Image (cartoon, grey):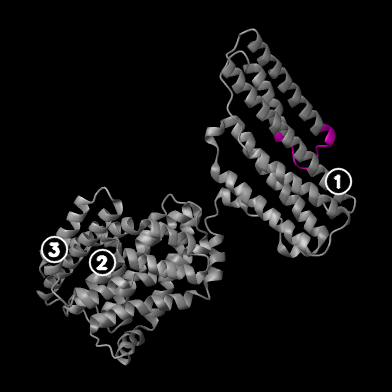
């Protein structure tokens, strides 16, 4: 075998694929983001979006990595993302058809060299336009892609290579499994299933590989492409890891199904096209097999998708996601007012605990260290609580203690929202430091009192009064300093704004506690709620 031609062909092919994918991503980037953002509202639309985007950029890995980025940013849910992933697996089969229909049938060097030149000239002269430059890189990538295929054909044509030379018996299951493993390794090494498919198609076109073992390699390539998604999730969110695992699940299920039916699928790949009057050879059959493999995956995964989503949703649960998941609410409770009020009270108390802890940490650490993910999770939890309240109110009319408790609990949620608004930072003026510290201690007392029902309204009001007194003392000091010229106006303004924000936090925290106590006490008269 001409090793130099083989390595050069693989290198040019990978370079061409990289340039083509990068260029098409740049040229079509805004449109692709629009598709991801608006075409994923249902399973069918997500599937079609994944197919279309991958057919455009010619890389399922690029599509799936982009989806993982959207999931990391919270722009796509797991349900939306996995259908795009499934569609991407079908869309990536277009590269096999391009190679089978054009790449291995014609001498593409005469086309590839000018394409590289024209593409790079466009990239050079239109570099001020990102989309035009990207289009030029894509054209150059296509050229390198086809030149690489030509070199691969020459390398395989110059050899007597066959699977038997490797000691693999393709008539045995163990031999076919070894070829599946070879496809996985080849894809992992090149980090491109398209490269593995193209190499396999070129080997088939050159007679170096028969159709059946080539189909086994394609199954392995389809499984091996999941490595890119898995690598992309390193350091990513739990949601991103779930998305990558959905890709693994799809590829393994599709691969297992196709392997079990391998002889039938290989036969059907050619027979189906022959019935349509299409002239077929082994490369066309292999491209058709690749498409059937992924369509089989869609058919097999479709009924399993709801269970898969539920399973993945319970994996890699982060601390922030654990906050967002209600512990005491159940849709079945909404039909029983007393039990619904119990769950609502406990979940609202939990939301208040998280909100107060969040605010306490922000006061101690400073607004610059605010954890956006934690704040978002608390708001998601409050959204779930409000949704549960809607369910309660749309079922049987409420009366008695539950009816009195619900408005108080809804008001507690409003107070939780106020607590999530970050206060400004105070100045570092030495003169008012002790008074600022006294106010902070008073407000932190309002935030850290126990939520287990042991406190009473008098204790809460006393804490609020102490915080108000500390605020009054600090305000008098600041105004006196301003009056006697002992502090600059900007320092007084800054400290007054901080003090007013903290006073408001202490007031809101105490009001939330009192409303929570009212909800518990009113319901306790009928025994519906027990703290």
Q: Secondary structure at mark 3?
A: helix
* Mark nearer the N terminus (2 vs 3): 3
Looking at this rendering, what residue extends furthest in the top direction? 484
3 vs 1, front mark: 3
Q: Is residue 190 visible?
A: yes
Can you give x and y, in whole percent of width and height, for residue 308 in the image? 53, 68
Q: Secondary structure at mark 1?
A: helix
Residue shown at 57% from the left, 21% from the top: 427
Residue stretch rendered in magenta on the structure: 447-459
Dot 3 crowding, Cα within 10 Å, few <14, some 14–19, many 20+: some
Q: Which mark is residue 195?
A: 2
Can you give x and y, in whole percent of width and height, for residue 508 in the image? 73, 36
* Residue 202 on the magenta segment: no
The answer to the question of whether label 2 and label 3 lie on touching residues, with beta carbons closer than 8 A, is: no
* Mark nearer the N terminus (2 vs 1): 2
Q: Give the quarter of the figure containing the N terminus.
A: bottom left
Dot 1 crowding, Cα within 10 Å, few <14, some 14–19, many 20+: some
Q: Is residue 327 visible?
A: no
Asked which quadrant contains residue 391, the reply is bottom right
Mark pair 2, 3: CA separation: 22 Å
On the picture, is 271 further left or further right than 337? left
Q: Secondary structure at mark 2?
A: helix
Mark pair 2, 1: CA separation: 68 Å
Asked which quadrant contains residue 259, the reply is bottom left
On the picture, is 125 further left or further right than 66? left
- Classified by dominant secondary structure, the portion drawn in magenta counts as loop
* Mark nearer the N terminus (3 vs 1): 3
Can you give x and y, in whole percent of width and height, for residue 27 in the image? 31, 57
Residue shown at 35% from the left, 62% from the top: 61
Q: How many marks?
A: 3
Q: Which mark is residue 114?
A: 3
* Residue 448 on the magenta segment: yes
């Amino acid at each position: 075998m001409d090793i130099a031609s083989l390595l050069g062909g693989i290198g040019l092919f990978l370079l061409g694929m990289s340039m083509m994918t990068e260029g098409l991503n740049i040229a079509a980037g805004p449109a692709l983001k629009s598709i991801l953002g608006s075409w994923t509202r249902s399973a069918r639309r997500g599937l079609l979006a994944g197919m279309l985007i991958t057919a455009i950029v010619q890389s399922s890995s690029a599509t799936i990595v982009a989806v993982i980025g959207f999931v990391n940013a919270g722009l796509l849910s797991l349900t939306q993302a996995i259908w795009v992933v499934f569609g991407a697996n079908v869309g990536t089969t277009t590269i096999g058809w391009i190679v089978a229909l054009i790449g291995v049938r014609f001498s593409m060097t005469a086309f590839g060299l000018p394409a590289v030149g024209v593409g790079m000239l466009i990239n050079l002269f239109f570099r001020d336009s990102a989309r035009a430059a990207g289009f030029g890189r894509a054209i150059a990538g296509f050229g390198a892609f086809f030149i690489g295929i030509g070199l691969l054909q020459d390398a395989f044509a110059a050899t007597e290579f066959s699977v038997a030379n490797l000691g693999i018996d393709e008539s045995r299951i163990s031999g076919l499994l070894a070829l599946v493993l070879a496809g996985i390794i080849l894809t992992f090494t090149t980090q491109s299933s398209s490269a593995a498919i193209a190499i396999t198609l070129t080997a088939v076109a050159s007679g170096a590989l028969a159709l059946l073992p080539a189909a086994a390699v394609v199954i392995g390539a389809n499984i091996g492409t999941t490595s890119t998604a898995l690598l992309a999730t390193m350091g990513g969110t739990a949601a991103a890891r779930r998305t990558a695992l959905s890709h693994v699940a799809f590829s393994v299920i599709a691969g297992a199904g196709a392997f079990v039916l391998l002889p039938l699928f290989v036969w059907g790949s050619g027979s189906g096209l022959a019935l349509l009057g299409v002239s077929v050879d082994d490369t066309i059959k292999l491209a058709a097999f690749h498409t059937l493999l992924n369509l089989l995956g869609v058919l097999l995964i479709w009924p399993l998708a709801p269970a898969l989503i539920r399973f993945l949703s319970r994996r890699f649960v982060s601390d922030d996601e654990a906050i967002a998941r209600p512990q005491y609410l159940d849709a079945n409770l909404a039909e029983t007012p007393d039990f619904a009020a119990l769950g609502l009270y406990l979940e609202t108390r939990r939301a208040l605990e998280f909100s107060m802890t969040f605010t306490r940490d922000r006061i101690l650490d400073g607004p610059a260290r605010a954890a956006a993910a934690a704040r978002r999770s608390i708001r998601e939890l409050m959204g779930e609580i409000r949704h549960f309240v809607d369910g309660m109110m749309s079922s049987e009319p409420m009366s008695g203690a539950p009816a009195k408790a619900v408005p108080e609990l809804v008001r507690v949620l409003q107070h939780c929202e106020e607590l999530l608004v970050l206060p400004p930072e105070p100045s570092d003026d030495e003169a008012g430091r002790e008074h600022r510290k006294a106010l902070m201690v008073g407000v932190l007392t309002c935030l850290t009192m126990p939520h287990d029902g042991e406190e009473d309204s008098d204790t809460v009001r006393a804490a609020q009064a102490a915080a108000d007194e500390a605020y009054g003392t600090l305000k008098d000091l600041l105004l006196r300093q301003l009056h006697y010229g002992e502090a600059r106006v900007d320092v007084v303004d800054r400290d007054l704004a901080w003090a007013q924000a903290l006073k408001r936090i202490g007031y809101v925290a105490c009001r939330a506690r009192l409303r929570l106590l009212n909800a518990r006490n009113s319901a306790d008269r009928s025994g519906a709620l027990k703290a």
